[in-house]
Structure formats: structure tokens, C-alpha cells
Amino acid sequence: MRQAVTTLSMWGERHFGYTTLRDSTETLGDERWPQIPRLKEDSVIEEKEVEEDSGLEQTPTSEEQDAVVGLASVLPMDSPHGGEQDHDLRRQLEAQPKVCKLPFGVKPEKEPGMDGRGGVGGGGGAANCVATPSPDNDHPAGTLDEDATPPSGSLGEVAPVWVPDSQAPACMKCGAKFTFTKRRHHCRACGKVFCVVCCDQRCRLTHLDGKEGRVCVSCHFTLMNRSAPKDPRRVWFPDGLLPDSDARDSTGTLDQRPSNSSQPRRPSVLGTGGQVVAADAPSGWGMGALVGSPIGSSTNLIPSEGLPPILTSTGVKGDYTVEERPSEMSLMVELEGGRAEPLVFVLNANLLAMVKLINYVNRRCWCVMTKGMHAVGQAEVVVLLQCLPDEKTFPRDIFTHFIQLYRDALAGKVLNHLSHSTVSRGLLGSKEHAGFLYIRPTFQSLDGLPLPSQPFLFGLLILRAETPWAKAFPLRLMLRLGAEYRFYPCPLFSVRFRKALFGETSHTIMRLLVDFRFYRYTLPVVTGLMVDMEARSTCIKIPKTRHSELLKALNKSNEHVLAMGACFNENADSHLICVQSENGQYQTQAISIHNKPRRVTGACFFVFSGALKISSGYLAKSSIVEDGLMVQITMESMVELRRSLREMKDFTVTCGKLDQSDNQECVYIQWLDQEPRFNKGISSPIDGKSMDSITSIKMFQKSEYRANGKVIRWTEVFFLQRDKQANGPVNPTTYSRLTERLARTFCLALCSYLKLLKEDGMAKLGLRVTLDTQRTDYLAGSNGQALPSQYMKILDSALMPVIQAGALQRGEGPLEMEFFFYIQENIS
């Protein structure tokens, strides 16, 4: 790696006279050398100073004389070809009267009057000054009087006095000496002279009529920390992260950027450790490089007071302005005025929060949703919060909670259907607000809701007294909320300061099945298991592909009692619910779909007890207990039931008295070939193939692959075809080595091109691998199309050896997998 850098440096020294990579970039950026292609991000971040000068009032005479002075300063003292004519020409040019510009005017990148070292020949002075610089501006470098620098209170408001270039042989901050390649740069706020490293920031200055000017690091820090509200900054989102902002138009071509988009890319060079770093790339911010932001790499942009930064569209697709300290009052006026599009808040460089006031089922609600959770393997989250009367403040606590969910997802803790999240110090103005219960919408209306892309979950506000049920038996809490607000199966909105729906747990049957104190054991739930209750018959349906899950629950259960939780029955039109009365007793009720007759009723759990004696005169007894089913059978029947479950055989329990066959009821246990639906709405980034009901595993890679401020994450692998149980559960250890090897190779191959891929709108990538004895192949793509040929060539050389080796080692049936990857900003 070092040899490659050394070779490049020696080549630059022979051809251009520089000896380091930093100097090479600065030299090539000079107007004397041909322009090298620049990165797209640089075109947004680095505004040309020439454009800043275009608005300044300058007389033609001043421009012409400055050009004459500048020409004289760049002529070499000992020209090998000019001889005495050059000396005569120099004397004639120096004899011309010098006219200075306005004090502290914003000058082009190649400043007027530049000498051979990159310095300015004639220093600035007062307005319309003559050849001799002002005495106030004649201070040696490093000993500038305090009067030469504006006071901190007027910094940026009053034009400073510039330090003459002749008095600044070195940077006034780091001490680096100026050379032909290391150019001088004046700070437009304090007037001192710095190198490009110490003076690479930009701020809007009052004395420049609000235009941006180059400032040093110290002045930038001072200006950024003022109490005055900041002006909006421009930010570019190239990856279509925002809603309704696709990176490609309908023809599949990339959108053109509104400013500086035609400038070519700046080359990248290989850094230490195999990472790719941009040559002389300025510090960027987030998804689109917020210009000059000191908090760009923060994982939390929510201030202690006020609202997080907000994005506002400029009218051009993908182009936004950033307001760091938005006015809450003005935003509330906007929302109450019927703003069509949601407000977009920046929680960190990879996570946004969209906020809108809506009317949902005759309730005025805050609609707050995330954008960016998919890239860390987490479903997007939507919170509908009913507004309080005359509410004029934003629900800031939801933003903070979203940040916590994002961090948990990075650590491998993701939320699924009926998962929950809690806080310790209260939420949304009440210590009784404990967190959220997350549910997947089923029968609820989604009309008029601004929703993120699938998958997403709705967060329901829960109280501290309800957290035991959120942890131990969330289905009961979900259905109880539905009964409280008359929505089947539950509402999607949350109500603050409501009464707790559950309290003491001493009077429920669940205290025998669940450890409510330490949660060391709870009611096991088999995915897809449902209970159908009809007239005189009950059917417990278990998917065959979930036999392994049932065996685990069976092995852990007591031999006399078999209890399991059920999933919400989407095939039923009603469901049993449990309601706690004021005296603490738990009672049974039912909730059903509005205006639909009750035919099939679902239950939340079932319990088989082997305590029934033969002498009782009953074959078996069945009864409804709270929101579940209790079946009492003999010990002989319990043994037969367990055997049938292990052997995946149907079983029937006849309930009733021995001598009354007419009033008997039956409880059936059936094994179904049908697999419950999951991964709804997810499609392949390669060709749009639906991943509905295709088995997948969430992945959280231990090591990260970073380059140029970007990081690529592997979030999920889908098993499109397997040799056994094509749609059944997957044992992660079965394919762990192969999948990790493929994902690692893919990340390493594209690591050097993460910035280019993300800038071209390819932040979500897919890799589909086919392993078979007769065919081994792969396909990589993004946005419904295959990756460009230059990337495919790189992947060919890296992936094909791994794929072929994996096919030979397996020696089994066909295997087809698809990997999902996301490119993000590196904010860790």
C-alpha cells in the first residue's frame, strides 16, 4: 500500500513539482493546471469564489488594473526564454498605478495580484485606496494588532482589515510555510492568512450581503455557536432517501443536480489500511454533505431545547435547504394551515423523522414516522398520537425515542410484530407513559396516512402498569386496546394521559403460566399457530414448517400441562379478549369486525391439563378461560396428544359426558401445509421480485466495511430456494459460513466505490447467488436494474471463486439466496 502512494508521489514530483498527495491535490486544483474530474459531493460543498464575486460592484478600471498587477506578479524573475525583455516588461507593469478593491471583498479562488508563490501582490486597503497599502494593514505575520481583527461581537458583520500577503510567509494557525503549491487564503471574517486546511469552511457573512465567504476554522466555530438563528444551508440527497424523491427518473437516467452538477469527479486515492479516501475532500455532513456543519458525524442531532434540523425542498428534486434551528411557532402555523407534505426533521445523518398533522378516524393526530431504519435491519416505525386540546408544541420525545430504536438496531436488537420498547423516566409529559407496543396493521384503515415503504410497524403508547403484559403476553394488551376504542383488532392511534387497562396480576390464570416478577419463563408462541372457535368445535391449526418450534415448546413444558400462546387469527371475524374489572377480576368478552356476523372466533392461548380423572364421568372438558381455551383430559390422553404432536399427526379430543353423545364437542389439532404470510411488501432491489412469504434471516455483521466516510451494511438474506423445506424456518448455523463469506467478499469488492454508488442513487443493493451442481451464477443490482458493467467486472473477479468453491463444498441440492445491503454515512 505504501509503495503505491510513493510511486504516485514521485510521478507527481517529476511532472508537476509536488511531493505529497495533499500538495498534489492543491496544485491540480489551481487554475494553472488542467482541471481534474471532481467528486459530485465536492461540487455541492465547495462553492466557487468566482460565483461569490459576481454580485460585487466593481468598476471596469479596477478589474483591468488588477489584472495588470496580477500579470506582473506571476512572471518569473529569471525566465529562461524571456531574457531582458521580461525584465523590461516587468518594470513597465510595475510602473502602472495600483488601485485596490473594496476592503475585504470576496475574491476569486485565484486572487488578483497573485505572485509566483500564490500570494497577493498588492494588499487590500480602504475603499478606492492608492498604491501604498494602508498603515493599519502593515503588521507582521503572527503579530497582528487586535485592532486589525474585528471584535467577536462584530465578527462577520464588519469587513476586517486584511493581512498583507507579503507579511504572511506561513499559515497564521498551523505555521505551514506557503509555497508555489501551498497557497494563501484570507479569512473573510478576521482578515488573517491561512492555508487551505485551516481555512476551508464557509459561512454567510453580513458584510457580504448574506453571501457565503471563506472563513478559518476558529471564526467558523465562533460564528456557528452564536445564539442568532442560522440561515438555511443547501444539502443534496442523491439516494432518494426522502419520500417522492427518486434518484432516477422514469427513463432510468440520473437526475441532474441543480448547481455544479456538470463538474467532473475529483479522483480518489488509496489510503492506509486499504481504505479509500477522497483526495482533498472536505468534511461532509450526512446523506448530502451539509456545508460547514460542525455536527455532521453526530449520531444525535436533537438539541437539548428546540427542534432538530429541518429540511425544506427548493423545488428541484433531491435539492433541499437545511435550517438548523427551526422556529417551532412558524412550523406549527404551517402544519395547522394544511401543509400537504410532511415536515422532514434530521435526527442523524442516516435517520429522518417525517411529521404531519392529519385527521384520522375523526381524530386530530400527529403522524410521526421514521425514514432510514431499513438500512440497519429495522422496520420503519409510525406513531399516530392524538393531539391534545389547543396543542402548540411538537412531540419531541418521539424523536429521542427513534434515536434509541436506531441505536438498538445497530446493536442487533430489532423490533417485530408485538415487540415493545420502554423508557425509564416517562414520556410525552407523563411518568406513567412507559413506551410503545409495536403492531403490524391488519384490518385497520390506512386511508389518508403518509406511510413509509414496507415493512413498517405502528407504535401504540403503553402505560407503566401495562408493561408486564407487553413483556409477557402482548396479544392480550393489543386486543384490549381494540375493545377500549372500538377498533378491530386494535387502534393505530395513541391517547395520552388515559387510564391503565390492566393493573394487579394476582387474579389471572396467567400468573400460573408466566413469571411476572423476573420473566424467567413465559408462554411459548409458535409462529402461525391459531385457534378457530366455532359452534361445538374448536380447531388448533399448526403449520407443518413450524414443527421444530413446537418441539422446543413441548420439551420445555410440564408433562401434566401443555400451554401455548396463539397468534392473532386473521381468518377469524372476532376474537376473545380479557377485561379487568374495577375489583381486579379478569373477565371474558369478545370483539368483532364492525357490521360483520360472528362465525369464527379466535383465542389467545390454549391449555391442556392432564388432571382429569376417569371416574369423573367425562371424556374431556373444554371451557373458555379469560381470552383462551382450557381443555381438561386424562393422563392417558395427554400421553397420546404429546406423541401425535411429536410425530406431526392430527389429533382429536372429544369433550362431554360419556353417556351424552348429543352434547359432545370436539377439539381438533390439525397440521397445515399453508405457511403464514410474512415479509409482505418487500421486493428485490435487483429486479423487483416479491419476497412475500419467503424465509429470511436478519443479519448483523460483526465487522463494518468503510471507505470515504461511507459504510456498507448487510441486513438480511432471503432463501429463494433450498434443498429442504423451501419455505420452512432456517437454521442460521447451516448456511452461516457460506453466507458470511459471500457477504464479506461483496462488501470488500465494492468498498472502494461506496461513495460513487451512493451518489448515483444506488444506496440499496441486492446480491442473488445460485448454487447448483450444474449451474453457479450471481446477479447484483439496485433500483430494479443490474449494476453498471464497471462494478460487475470487479464483482466477477471477487465473487466467482467464492461461489464456485461454495458449490463444490456443499454437494447438496440447489440453493438460491438473495442478500440485501445498504450504503450509509459513517457516523459511528
Image: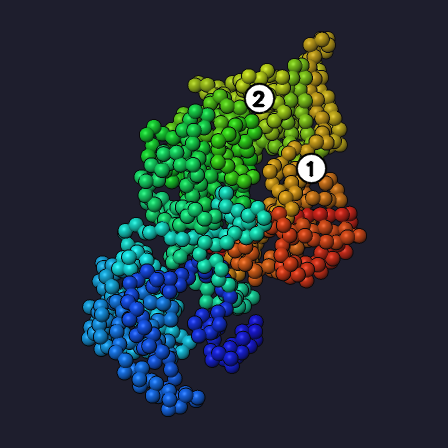
Question: Label 1 vs label 2: CA separation?
Answer: 27 Å
Say if 81 sits above or below 443 in the image: below
Say if 759 sits above or below 35 in the image: above
Q: Residue at x 42, y 59 (%)?
A: 45
Q: Residue at x 67, y 50 (%)?
A: 768
Residue in the foreground of this view, choosing between 618 and 93:
93
Residue 648 appears in view: yes
Q: Residue at x 54, y 31 (%)?
A: 441
Residue 423 appears in view: no
Q: Residue at x 54, y 22 (%)?
A: 577
List the residue tagged with mark 2: 575
- Amino acid type assigned to the residue bearing label 2 in the image: His
Looking at the picture, how far across and down is residue 488, in whole percent?
53, 23
SS class of the residue under badge 1?
helix
Left or right for 801, reference 261: right
Residue in the foreground of this view, choosing between 552 and 491:
491
Residue 641: which numbered mark, if any?
Answer: none
Looking at the picture, how far across and down is residue 152, in whole percent?
24, 61
SS class of the residue under badge 2?
strand
Q: Residue furthest right?
A: 774
List the residue tagged with mark 1: 548
